[in-house]
Every structure is written in structure tokens, then in C-alpha cells.
Image: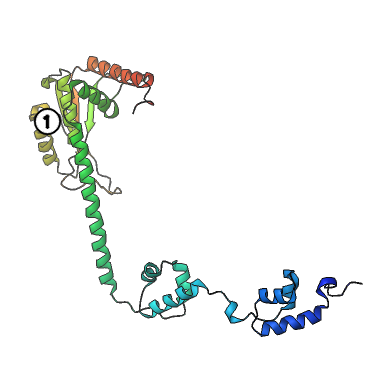
Amino acid sequence: MAHPSGTSGRYGDFEELRDRAIALRRAGRSLRQIRDELKVFNNDILNRLVKGEPPPEWTKRPNAKDDLRQKARELRLQGRTYDQIQVALGCSKSSISLWVRDLPKPERRRSTKEASAIARRGWEAKLRIRDEERSRTKEAAARGIGNISDRELFLVGVGLYWSEGSKDKPYARREKVTFVNSDPGMIKVFLAWLHLLGVERERLRFTVMIHETADVAGAERYWSDLVDAGRHAFGKTTLKRHNPRTVRKNTGDGYRGCLAVKVLKGADLYRRIEGAWYGIVEAVRTTDHSNRT
């Protein structure tokens, strides 16, 4: 007949074994030592034999976080912030928060104004570094261009015009060459491209397009000097009316509106530009660029 506690056979009487196990436990023995002495090699039964009896102190494994917790509390009492404690101990802020949340917060050593000033100086330093990196990158890229051949200028000009110039539409035949831009560099490249194509300066007409509240006269002088053309080559300035509900961002001394450059008798030139653009597209389509290194 089986023992009611399920310990018949090799383990004998359960209650007797439990009494002996408890005595050994209270004498400071570990589970392994009790196992070896009582010859009870079933872990489930072994744990039942010592149930309710705490393990001796010497068997408890030290918790590595206990030391970190104590150090974190010491640093917090010294007035350290979470960031400073994290750097010192290498643990997460969430753990630090749990360990020291019952401790008083350190007194603020700087006023809000002082802290803001420090943060602002740090941000300004970062911006200066970014500006320097940006300038170095641009300067290196500019130096990398070197001299430009006539063919390169021609291709650049075709792409420039096709992105920014007026274009003929099937529903509105306008084979005219008109280029509008606010970037003086774009205007200069476009004029150099027209010169490459043999377009005489006498065929060029210019129109300033600007907001009516801007410095209209100053803009007219600026564009006239840039393209080196007298007032006779300029048409009437186009003024954009001011909408009082609109907040303008294109303000300040650097705003000079846009300049429209028109080529008189430009139908044939327009057809050449359009054809050249289609040629570029076809060349790209038929050229395998994937194997270039």
C-alpha cells in the first residue's frame, strides 16, 4: 500500500524525513548537503521537505544590483542628477528612478536663466560646427568641378532650361524661349549658355518680377548690373499685388524678386532645345548605368 504522502519505498516515511530535513536546515545546511545526507535525489520532494524553512544566509547569492543601488543612492544624496548617476554607474535611468525615488531631489544649482544660457551656448557651438562642415563640403564640391567644356555647358543649359524655362504644349503652341529665376547664379549660367549657342545680346529682353512692397528700384538696378544691360533692354517691371492675409517670407535686403529673360525670334532655338532634351533622355534610357563604378 502506497504512503499517503507519496513517499513510500526508497524514501521511507515522509514526516520522519521532513523532521530530519528541517533539523539540518536549521543547522545551516544547504539543499545540496541535505540531499546528500538524506539520499533524497528528487528535487520536488526535497523542496517539500524543507518547505517553510528559510535558507541559511551563507547560501544566498549576492545581488549585483544591490551594490549599484547603494552607490546610486549615495550619489543622489550628494546632489547628482539622473544623467550624472547614469554616466557614473552605467545603469539605466529607469532603474535609478526606482532606487532613489524616495530621496529628496537635489537643489537646483543654476537658475533657469543660467541653464538656458548654457544650453544656448552649447546649441550655438553645434550650429557653428555644422556651418563649418557645410562650408567645407560646398567648397570641396566647387573645387571638384574645375574647368567646364563647351559640351558640358551645353548639356547643363539644356537641363537648366527644361526645368525652369517656358515650354510648348500641344494645346497651346508657344515656341518661345523665356527663362525666369530668382537665383543670380542660374541667370548667369543661362546667359553664358545662350552666348555658347550664338544668341546675340540684341535679341535679349529682360523683365523684373517683384512684390510691390519690396525695394523695386533697388531690384531693377541689381538685375541691370548683373546682366550688364541698360534700361532699353528691360520691359516694364511686373509687380505682384500684396494680399494682406498673406505673411510674406521673401523679405529683407536679399530679396530682389525674379528676372525673366526672353529671346526674341526664338522659335528655332526652342525647337533645338526641345530636341536636345529628348536626345539626353534617350541617351540615358539606352545607356546601362548600373555597371558603372
Tag 1 residue? 227
| Left or right: where 124 falls relative to 221 | right
* Placement of 2 over or under 135, stated as above or below: below
Q: Residue at x 49, y 75 (%)?
A: 66
How crowded pointer 1 is (Cα within 10 Å; few <14, some 14-19, many 20+) is rated as: some
Q: Residue at x 65, y 77 (%)?
A: 30
In front: 244, or 152? 152
In front: 187, or 80? 80
* Placement of 72 over or under 263, stated as above or below: below
User: Which percent across, then down, holds residue 92?
Assistant: 45, 66
Residue 150, picture quadrant: top left
* Placement of 229 over or under 83, stated as above or below: above
Residue 213, picture quadrant: top left
User: Which percent across, then down, holds residue 185?
Assistant: 18, 34
User: Which percent across, then down, holds residue 114?
Assistant: 25, 71
User: Which percent across, then down, holds residue 140?
Assistant: 20, 39
